[in-house]
Image: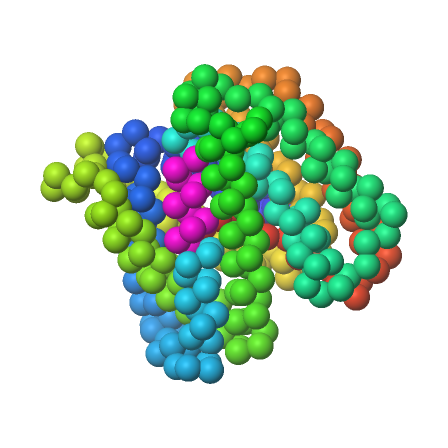
Amino acid sequence: MILVFVLFGLFASVFTIQKEALLFASPFFLVGSRMLLAGFLLLGISLYRKKPILSTLQKGNGLFEITVLAIANIYLTNVLELWGLQYLTSFKTCFLYSLSPFLSALIAYLTWGEKLTGNKLMGLVIGFVGFFPMLLTSTSVEKAVGELWVFSWPELAIIGAVVTSVWGWIVLKELVHTHKTDPLVANGWSMLIGGFLALIHSYLFESWNPIPVTNIPAFLQCTLLLIIISNILAYNLYGYLLKRFSATFMSFAGLSTPLFTALFGWLFLREEVTGVFFLSLSVVFIGLLMFYREELKDVAHPIEASPPAP
């Protein structure tokens, strides 16, 4: 049980480290360099374990899914997340990722025809309502970037990141179960391709003089920590724990991630945590509780938990 909270503490630290790293590097370059290095590392580990890494890139063997995974789960998710994180607190960014199980449920309903009972629907509605207090509380920094209706552009960017993240995890599941692709190989190639796309984006839109980094030692330290914690430790531990605990339990335990992020943000980034955050988190928890109490009665199409973006 302790490992579960260690896991979500690790995921929480990623948001804190990324927020710190943005002080020293441009967001798209940060995404691209980190994912490129992580992709090479994961593929290197796969070769060491004698896993086939080239067969996955053959047509009909998962090439299309690898490409979609790279674009959705690596490039779009992380570019949107890092751009939005520049203007949001780390804990608000992390909290918005709690949308994942609700979006997964909607996708299951729209694509797989899963039935939504009255209690499930009520749980989803309450859960979505729970996000509004946080979404309607914008800082002057957020508002300066611009708004669409009552939502700031950074908030919408993070919501977009959550959508592409959920989409990416569905594609990864398809790769692993249908094409029997090793998860390490799939993530390695997707990070390599997605990181390359992010670096191209950085070169086109960020100032390279010679690179968009103001403090190279601090940038390298943050990047190394992110790769070790997120790309290696957290995701492998997540896979291990899913074999011991249900996806339902992991979804509930995942609500501790924003709490850890709020603690780390307060301790290390001097972010002010308001009562609105705890109000929103409590309402979202009630929504999840209502939904999953009904979910446990119907195991035909269980909604799987998905961690935050890598």
Q: Percent from the top left, x then y, of residue 285?
A: 73, 36
Left/right of residue 289 with respect to residue 210 in the rendered view: right
Question: Where 207 sits versus 150, above or below?
Answer: below
Residue 113 is left or right of residue 206, and the answer is right
The answer to whether residue 9 is magenta is no
Kindly tell me whether residue 260 is visible in this rendering.
Answer: no
Name the quadrant containing residue 46.
Answer: bottom left
Q: Which colour scheme is used?
A: rainbow
- Is residue 227 in view from this perspective? yes
Whether 205 is drawn above or below 86: the answer is below
Asked whether 71 or 231 is in front, the reply is 71
| Residues rendered magenta in the picture | 74-84
Query: Which residue reaches farthest front?
Result: 149
Give coordinates of residue 75: x percent, y percent: 39, 53
Q: Position of residue 180 (x, y in %)?
A: 53, 77
Main secondary structure along the magenta-highlighted residues: helix
Residue 1, placed above or below residue 49: above
Task: State the residue at coordinates (52%, 31%).
Answer: 148
Residue 97 percent across, percent down from the top left: 57, 41
**Identity of the residue drawn at 75% across and 43% down:** 124
Name which residue lies at 39% across and 37% down. 83
- Total numbered labels: 0
Q: In the displayed structure, does residue 69 sit left or right of residue 252? A: left
Query: As displayed, is residue 106 above or below residue 94?
Result: below
Q: Is 82 colored magenta in this rendering? A: yes
Which residue occupies 44% across, 41% down? 81
